[in-house]
Image (spheres, rainbow, N blue to C red):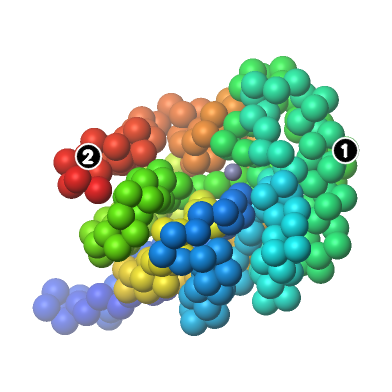
Amino acid sequence: MLNRRHFIIGSLALGGCGPAIVTKPSKRLAVTMDDFNIGFNVRLNPRERNERILAAFETHNHKAAGFVTGRFVDSMFGDEVVKSWSDAGHLIGNHSYSHMNSTEEAANLVTADILKNHAFLSRYNGYEKIFRFPYLAEGGSVEKVKIYRNFLRANGFQNGAVTIDTVDWYISSRLETRLKADKNADIEPYRDYYVKAVVTLAEHFQALAERIGQIDVPHSMLMHHNILNGLFLGDALSALKEAGWSLIDAKEVFAHPLYDLEPKTPTRSRSLLSVLAQEKGIEDTGYPEAYRNWGKKTMDALRL
Ligand SMILES: [Zn+2]
């Protein structure tokens, strides 16, 4: 396949008959950034944050996806932010207007909220009918999941599932707490921790994909429009490239048939790959030990 890298292993030492070709899966992902909760205003103001995120994508020639929650950007400045993404060629996806939890709220309220956001986002050229459930909560019960799936299908929405979770929201929330206490706090340890988490978690979910037979899956990596990415997205993307990852267009990622799969089990805030593993009876820890419970213990120990 074209998207596989071929490694030629020299066979001279073996005295064999020509080089053996070992095919390794390509490691490909698109950044998908949720929420657009753009209020935090310490160290970087929201405009600087957005500019730095877009500049990081530009530097890496990457077309990402932004899953926008309408109520966070229903303002003049919010419009400027979403428009800047759309104009730069990034995909704009639907993350509901109010960021309701689809498991806890009544289904008719949730579906109305999705349609409200659809009407709100339709003004942007980059908008596509791809919906991501807030909290990756797909309904909780089998019956409710069915209601949402039927609703999405009937209204022409695709489910924008996640395969790699970076727990960036948690790391950012700890950084925000630190910056609120001391705006001049040393932020480099947060950068180092985050960059390592992104690469480790990408490798973890790629290994899981290989174990369930999805060797060449193009990943959708979950991040959020937050201060952490405003400061360090560029570093994280550089580290991924150094680790052998390539960035591919988010539209190309969601065109892959993996994203049309409808596992019987609700995702319940997990990677789609974890759900598929569970259904195949493959043992899966969800996250590597260091990032269980979003990495709370690890960050506590590092005093971050
Ligand atoms: Zn969200």
Describe residue 215's horizontal placement relative to residue 20 as left or right.
Answer: right
Secondary structure of the residue carrying tag 2 is helix
Q: Nearer the viewer, mark 2 or mark 1?
A: 2
**Residue 265 position by quadrant:** top right
178 or 110: nearer the eye?
A: 178
Percent x, y of residue 165 = 45, 47
At 75% across and 43% down in the image, what residue appears? 97
Q: Quadrant of ligand 1?
A: top right
Describe residue 1's horizontal placement relative to residue 262 as left or right.
Answer: left
Residue 264 visible in the snapshot = no
Amino acid marked by disc 1: Ala
Question: Does 150 appear above or below 16?
Answer: above
Percent x, y of residue 96 = 73, 42
**Residue 115 position by quadrant:** top right
240 or 125: nearer the eye?
A: 125
Q: Which residue is mark 1?
A: 154
Q: Residues within 10 Å of mark 1 (few under 14, many from 20)?
A: few
Secondary structure of the residue carrying tag 1 is helix
Amino acid marked by disc 2: Asp
Residue 134 visible in the snapshot = yes
Question: Does 92 appear above or below 125?
Answer: above
Q: Which residue is mark 2?
A: 300
At 62% across and 39% down in the image, what residue appears? 134
Query: Number of marks in the image?
Result: 2
N-term mark: 2 or 1: 1
At 52% across and 34% down in the image, what residue appears? 269
